Amino acid sequence: MPKSLLLRGGRVLDPSTGIDGFFDLLIDDAQVRHVGRDLQAGDAVVIELARGLVVCPGFIDMHVHLREPGQEHKETVATGAAAAIAGGFTAVACMPNTDPVNDQAGITEFILKKAAAADKARVYPIGAVSRGSRGEQLADIAELHAAGVVALSDDGKPVASALLMRRALEYAGMFRMPVIDHCEEPTLKGEGVAHEGYHASLLGLKGIPAAAEEIMVARDVTLAGLTGGTLHIAHMSVEGSLRAVREGKDRGVRVTCEVTPHHVVLTDEALDGYDTNFKMNPPLREARHREALLGGLGDGTVDAIATDHAPHHYDEKGVEFDRAPFGIVGLETAVPLALDRLVHAGVVSMPRLVQLMSINPARILGVAGGTLAPGSPADLTILAPDLDTTVDPARFLSKSRNTPFGGWSLRGAVAATIVGGRILYAHSAFPALAAAKVARA
Amino acid sequence: MSAPSNLDRAESVGRPLREEPRPATRLRARHLLGIADLSAEEILLILDTAEAMKEIGARPIKKVPTLRGRTVVNLFFEPSTRTRTSFEIAEKRLSADTLGIAVGTSSVVKGETLADTALNLEAMAPDMIVIRHGSSGAPHLLSRICRSRIINAGDGMHEHPTQALLDAFTIRAHKGRIAGLKIAIVGDLLHSRVLRSNVLLLKRLGADVWVCGPPTLMLPGIEQFGVHATTSIDEALADADVVMMLRIQLERMQGGFFPSLREYFNVFGLTAERARRAKADAIIMHPGPMNRGVEIASDVADGPYSVILEQVANGVAVRMAVLYLLEGSVA
């Protein structure tokens, strides 16, 4: 089996090297070799791409929940990594709120072993900030780092103590790892299940005020400034959080942030009917916050799009709204949503989308990828921006189906996902990509 | 007569009606999940039907065969005296076979989910399920998985539609109309499903609705409900035609929404002196159960303007109307 692949005729788009045009791209030995015109095929497998396809550095979802160990009925590393590939992601970073929590090297090694066996998307574990994510004592961060953790977070259980957050930012700095915070002031959040405002009031649902998030973002930005640590704000959902991040960036604080596709596509109006697939944390906000997030995507305040892929079994979601767990799956809908609602809608350009979904996540996490420079790993996402997608949860590779987007028609699809030079996913509309066989390096 | 028009919801909420619309000839929805789903015409149909039902309750033999052979399950996940008894009497007066299931005696205590409880009941083919549940939206969940008709008897902080209907029935009995009346609703607005259903209904029929309570118990986004909101009970009561007091839900008060019950009564309690700010012929309402000396002084609750027990009596007729219109009117 050949070890080389020559992609011909697509639009190669890599803002990290300034490439944007119709080029050939040669992959050899799991690395990008050349991007240029009229490259010699040699013994490479040659694929002629339709001109409408866009070849980008591989997309990286820096915020997913793979549920293994401990909640394998929702997802496993293998099913999650397969869902990632099907969704156009060549790599994912998985949150540590498994059971047990990924707060020690043994768990990290277990996840990496499962990921290697799955042989799908690359998996970068995120370690816990505190032991058991209990918010009391720092986890064994040096050991986690040595085992392969790329960032720290107590996602799902926000770091309530300012002192612990300070220590985490200071200590993680030694390993150049970002601390990723799920920003939420626990007493203001209380038992809230929906954005505090008209719609929650009408539906009789307990509210989570925007301030619950904004306060913690402001606190964390202040602490990042104090410590010189690297802070990344997860799934920002309100205008005030953007303001705090913007202010921090302006004065040189090392802070980055992400938004999810669902927060930029949906609002709390969708809660009418009590479908628990619209229940997530942070909650869907009212329109003005959504508009602010769209502004942040456009003006550069937002650094990354991440899905917060949160699989739950239908038994867990099929209960009363206030008793259902927070979260939705996102890996297999993110790219069509981003293409339809952001690129085609004129919110962001295609190069900016590549920054948000590939270049910036790689840089924030300090992992390989996010570039098509010669010598870099051949992790590529090939987009079909004009191919229509109808979201069909029954066909998800994820173990869970908890999406609010079932049945949606969107313009834009993933044509293929290439990891380490091998085509691990190809859309059925592109049989040549599906048929190509490349040996692993 | 033409078919009932599907009144645009926003329009009917936002603008007082110049004249009362004509009653509808039937209900569109299979279930009664909330006032939000009812048009003004459908509300009037229920109220008019309840007038006829009230007459049945005045007969020596208070029973008609309308729902003979139909099975109604009363599924109550929260304690209730008034509403549950009222539904049971209504069902029996219509000759339905009824059974009540209280949480303590059901499988729920063994960890069964609401969906499974409902599906198991469904397997025994009831025609209607009346549900009271502590979670907002629980009746909606049932309506998605059950073939039976679902009647919401109070869900969390969301709606209590039959309470609002019986309140409207009572108001109409005294005032002859709803449109144009100044109606003041005072108390724990935040946690009240009675408030939400009443606001939706009274706005839809064109009332001038004032809501009043401490800022900590105000609904977020109240400005979008199309009501006047105030923290001054005097302002709310001034020239009111109807004063509706809401219960302070002592069981939900751990959050420290106000300093003390004593202070609450001093600032928001309905005293005889305050009641005099309302119109001379104003009626005083309370959905019960009352906390005497907290939201309402006993002399007001027991006084000549109180229609609190009438509300309870009217509840039976209104629930008979709802049962009949949902189930009895189809072959």
Image (tube, coloured by chain):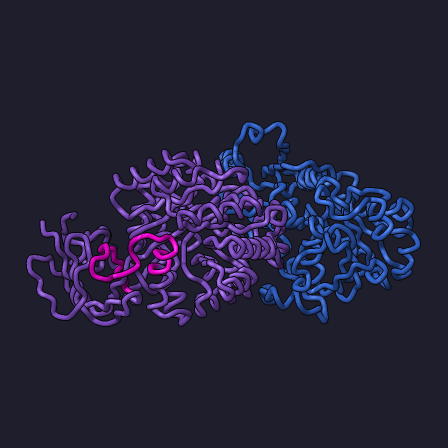
Colour applied to chain B: blue
Left or right, A268 with respect to A332, comes to right
Residue at 50% over, 33% down? B120
Residue at 27% over, 67% down? A17
Left or right, A257 with respect to B131, comes to left
Left or right, A20 with respect to B312, comes to left
Chain identifier, purple in the render: A
Q: Decide: is A136 above or below A251.
A: above
Specify the quadrant that holds the N terminus of chain B. Answer: bottom right
Observer able to see residue A269: no
> Who is closer to the viewer here, B103 or A116?
A116
In the rendering, at what x and y percent does residue A394 appear?
34, 48
Asked if residue A369 is among those painted magenta in the image, a careful observer would answer: yes
Q: Which residues are magenta?
A: A358-385
Asked if residue A220 is among those painted magenta in the image, a careful observer would answer: no
Residue at 26% over, 71% down? A20
Given the current orientation, which residue lies at the most extreme left position?
A42
